Image: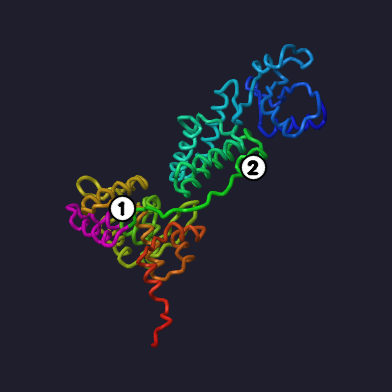
Amino acid sequence: MTPFVEAACREFVAENCLRCSECGSPDVWPELPDERRPWSESKLRLELEHAPIICRDCSPAPESRSGSREATREAAYMRRTDDRTAVPSQPDRGIQFGAAAVTAYLGALSPNSKRGMSDALRILAKLLGQESPEAVAWHQLRYGDTSALQAKLIASGRNPDGCKKIITSLRGVLKASKRLGLMSGEAFDRATELERIRGSRLRNVRNLRAGDLESLLAATRDDPKPMRAARDRAMLALLAGGGLRRAEAASLTTAHFHRLARTLRVCGKGNKERLVPLPLWAARALDEFIAARGFDGPLLCRVSQRGEALREPLAGGQAVYVVLHRLVDRAGLTAWTPPHGFRRAFGTGLLRNGTDVFLVSKILGHSNPATTSKSYDVRGVDDFSAAVDRLPDPESRE
């Protein structure tokens, strides 16, 4: 074996992170046919793709082996298929590694991000012919696999932003594989070196419509349980008056509310703390609820069936979602407004009033103002027309 071929074999084993599926040893080597004449680089690569992989720890010495190349191929511990997907002779081992990568990746995410990225991995798994992400050997994916996955996503007609999110989850689980030692750094870099997904679509989001907030506040006044009505008004004050995420609103206590300054000390995503100023009506709604119940503790607490305030907080953002859904039904609104719609309306209202986008991003708790501009500026055609109408008329004589 020439030094060129030996170096190529060593690089191939390292690039594809090949291991023996019997003993797990990394001391494996491709079994190439006899070199009758010098191979070109492309010919050598093709031979390596189809060569059986022999473990030096489990297999007999090369000089003691006998039989044809096809017989040796049948006894190989790991083969390479034409679609560049590694197929171990014991698939359970690859699945075990894939499940470990998924667990490590999702375990490092916040609960809200975990749901979205878990769905994205499930979409990728189906494209790979598997029922769940845990059944995919992610560490065995190479550039040919990842580029084909991205091409399938784009060809499926999905929103470009949705495709970007799914590819982000792919990069995340591959990075987890690298950190677990299942994938080399070079293999990770090559597998994730994908073309940028271009394009965007108009977002079809459910925003707060004009008059919806007034209808919801009016519905609280018709509630036969005054304490529950005060609690629901306080919740609307946090969502619409402070632009808080539902999980942020559920985690607040009375110690986070500064009554005189009309501010909230909020700890949001990424464990980042910020001060959120409240308008007069929102601060008044919080004051009235705290005074009516007569005790400190969770800012949004549970209310019993008899209409008494309890010292127990709402059970996270999902409880805020349920309370708001009940309030929307009582108000008789035809279109359901999700909790995040209040946050988008809050950011859009600040931008409509001329507030600088950098200041709005700080109030909303965004690290990047581009996030505020892209996802929380939902000004529509009427705002565009009003901006154009303010341009000077070149033929005006005034």
Please, what is the dominant secondary structure of the magenta stretch?
helix
For label 2, the crowd category at 10 Å Cα-Cα, with few meaning under 14, some 14 to 19 and many 20 or more, is some
x%, y% of residue 357? 47, 66
CA gap, disc 2 to disc 1? 42 Å
Q: Quadrant of residue 70?
A: top right
- Badge 2 marks a residue whose secondary structure is helix
In magenta, the rendered stretch is 208-235
Q: Amino acid at mark 1?
A: Thr
Residue named by callout 1? 337
For label 1, the crowd category at 10 Å Cα-Cα, with few meaning under 14, some 14 to 19 and many 20 or more, is some
- Residue at the farthest right position: 2
Magenta segment includes 212: yes
Residue named by callout 2? 189
Residue at the spot 24% in from the left edge and 59% down from the top edge: 217
- Residue at the farthest bottom position: 398
x%, y% of residue 260? 37, 67
The answer to which of marks 2 and 1 sits earlier in the sequence is 2
Residue 176 horizontal side relative to residue 46, left or right: left
Of residue 31 and residue 36, the one placed in the foreground of this image is 36
Q: Amino acid at mark 2?
A: Asp
| Colour basis | rainbow
In this view, 20 is above or below 338: above
Which corner quadrant holds the C terminus? bottom left
Magenta segment includes 226: yes
- What label sits on residue 218 in the rendered view? none
In this view, 125 is above or below 368: above
Residue 179 visible to an observer of this rendering: no
x%, y% of residue 324? 29, 51
